[in-house]
Image: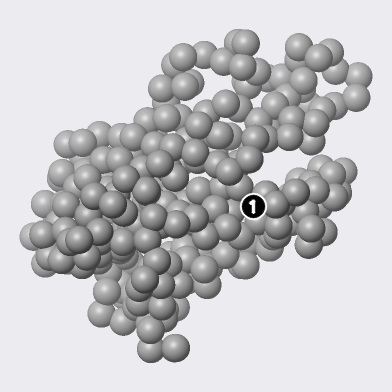
Amino acid sequence: MSDRLSLDGRTALVTGGAGFLGRRWVSSLLDAGATVISADRYLPTDGISSERLRHEKVDITDADGISGLVDRLTSARQTVDVLVNNAALDAPVQSSGLSRGERFETFSVERWYDEIAVGLTGAFLCSQAFGSLMAQRGRGVIVSVGSDLGLIGPDQRLYRIDGVRDEEQPVKPVTYSVIKTGLIGLTRYLATYWGDQGVRANVLCLGGVARDQSPTFVQLVSERIPLGRMASPDEYGDAMVFLCSDASSYMTGACLVLDGGRSVW
């Protein structure tokens, strides 16, 4: 079993690799033996150091930028065996009432375009560029980072603040649900489109991670989770390795759900 989980000799590209979850994917894939390319708009100034880690500055919403990345990797004789579609614009709910136009009635089309471009169009462009090469070689893995909110609707009661008018209450923005649901659709499409060419595609649907939220918020979320708590940041890495490795060789078009059971209630 350990041999099937090994990623020795394989190269994984992680979009948004400099972010909170991205760094954890990078670390877990390195631990599994992979060579990792971290692709992000920003180059990290600190963090993981490894001779098997390469940082690439790229805007995944730009098809020409992705094409340039493909050319650079080709020139360096690096073949991408695994693509992790992780990049997204963070959409945290505000803790002091409405301040960024989250509410559906006033959600700006500009923000809609920006967030869809990174979270969904970026995944499409990267899958198109790198998945096509995988299909030509007859082998490859695409994993998209989804959410339990791609399976269920957000419970906006979690974000309510006492004393704030209804029309100014913070909410989980519409783009988050649309992007995470869209990634499931993209994954199912890729799984059937390239299945006979050896390319597997799956979604890792994550629940909430405990990360400096208020104790009240953590308690409210935990009450909605059968396991009674939010996830720790280090609880998802092994599942990512599983999906990227031969241990999941007969799994494609699927959602691997790690949400403490929240989506079953």
Q: Residue at x 64, y 52 (%)?
A: 207
* Viewer-side residue, 245 vs 153: 153
User: Farthest residue in the right direction?
Assistant: 163
Q: Position of residue 86 (x, y in %)?
A: 43, 50
Q: Quadrant of residue 74?
A: bottom left
* Viewer-side residue, 258 vs 15: 258
For badge 1, the amino acid type reads Gly
Number of numbered callouts drawn? 1
* Viewer-side residue, 148 vs 88: 148
Q: Position of residue 206 (x, y in %)?
A: 58, 54
18 relative to 198 in the view: left or right: right
221 relative to 108 in the view: left or right: right
Q: Position of residue 29 (x, y in %)?
A: 41, 71
Res. 30 in view: no
Q: Secondary structure at mark 1?
A: loop
Please tell me whether residue 108 is drawn above or below residue 9 in the rendered image: above
Q: Which residue is mark 1?
A: 207
Q: Residue at x 73, y 34 (%)?
A: 155
Image quadrant in which the N terminus is located = bottom left
Crowdedness of circle 1 by 10 Å Cα count: few (<14), some, many (20+)? many
Q: Which colour scheme appears in the figure?
A: one colour
Q: Position of residue 219 (x, y in %)?
A: 86, 49
Res. 226 in view: yes
255 relative to 153 in the view: left or right: left
Q: Quadrant of residue 10?
A: bottom left
Q: Quadrant of residue 4?
A: bottom left
Q: Residue at x 25, y 59 (%)?
A: 195
